[in-house]
Amino acid sequence: MSITSFRLKGFAVKAGAAVGAATVLAMSAGPALAQELPGPSDASPDQEFTDAAAVVNQYWADHWTDYFTGSYTSPELLPGSSIGVPGLYDSNVEQLTCGQEDLPPLNAWYCGEGDYIIADYNLLNNQDVGDSFIWLVVAHEWGHAVQARLDLPYQAVADELQADCLAGAALAGATADGSMLWDAGDDQELFDTLDALADETPWTDPDSHGDTSQRVDAYNYGVLNGPNGCLP
Ligand SMILES: [Zn+2]
């Protein structure tokens, strides 16, 4: 969804170290680590969602002042009702709104009015969906929360691609921090999922979010260049 006019303050960009793809790959593997660190795995969708939210939020909390002025405040995860997991709901059971707007099913949102993130469980619990997709959804919606904390005007598609870029920056940064494990095959799985779901959900609609290659390029740009690379 598009962000609202919720704005905390302006920002200034600080010089920051870029996170290279080589760093991400170098952090992969290590069976001992795999037992201890969260990351795309075979956990349940709600556990993946909860882990991803904690990791991505921690990344922005730890690194906000590396890139921006002011201090970071966490967005909320709207308490789930039928699911019982913060940030998740079931569109088959309940209709949620953001402001005056009904949330369509098979979507995930950052709602500027209320500063919260919510995702339809049915978007994440899909046979075509790899685990790493859940991490992208979470990091992307967090990207919208970051956008809302900056004073930046964007058009619709660029808005969504910037969120993908910020998602790549956050997941690569969290991997470099050692706070999550991102295996070498996960990125391919991610792109396969985007392709498989294109035209099937609002969250993967090419008209509003860009096509798969645009999204992959934006995500990779964030991985390679960090948050600074996602800013105009
Ligand atoms: Zn979005």
Image (cartoon, helix red, strand yellow):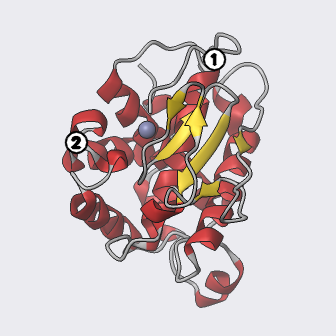
Identify the image quadrant of the C terminus: top left
Q: Which mark is residue 65?
A: none
The residue pinned by badge 1 equals 6
Task: Specify few, some or many for label 1: CA neighbours under 10 Å numbering under 14, 14-19, or 20 or more.
Answer: some
The amino acid on which the numbered mark 2 sits, given as a three-letter code, is Pro
Q: Nearer the viewer, residue 185 or 66?
A: 185
Q: Residue at x 70, y 29 (%)?
A: 114
Q: Nearer the viewer, residue 200 or 187?
A: 200
Relative vertical location of residue 196 with respect to residue 65 in this rendering, above or below: below
**Left or right of 126 in this view: 23:** right
Tell me, yes or no, if residue 17 can be seen here. Answer: no
- Rendered image quadrant of residue 111: top right
The amino acid on which the numbered mark 1 sits, given as a three-letter code, is Phe
Identify the image quadrant of the N terminus: top left
Secondary structure of the residue carrying tag 1 is: loop
**Left or right of 46 in this view: 191:** left
Label 1 lies in ligand 1 vicinity (Cβ under 8 Å)? no
Q: CA distance from mark 2 to mark 1?
A: 26 Å
Relative vertical location of residue 197 with respect to residue 212 in this rendering, above or below: below
**Disc with the residue nearer the chain's start (2 vs 1):** 1
Relative vertical location of residue 138 with respect to residue 38 in this rendering, above or below: above
- Image x and y of residue 13, in percent: 59, 19
The residue pinned by badge 2 equals 206
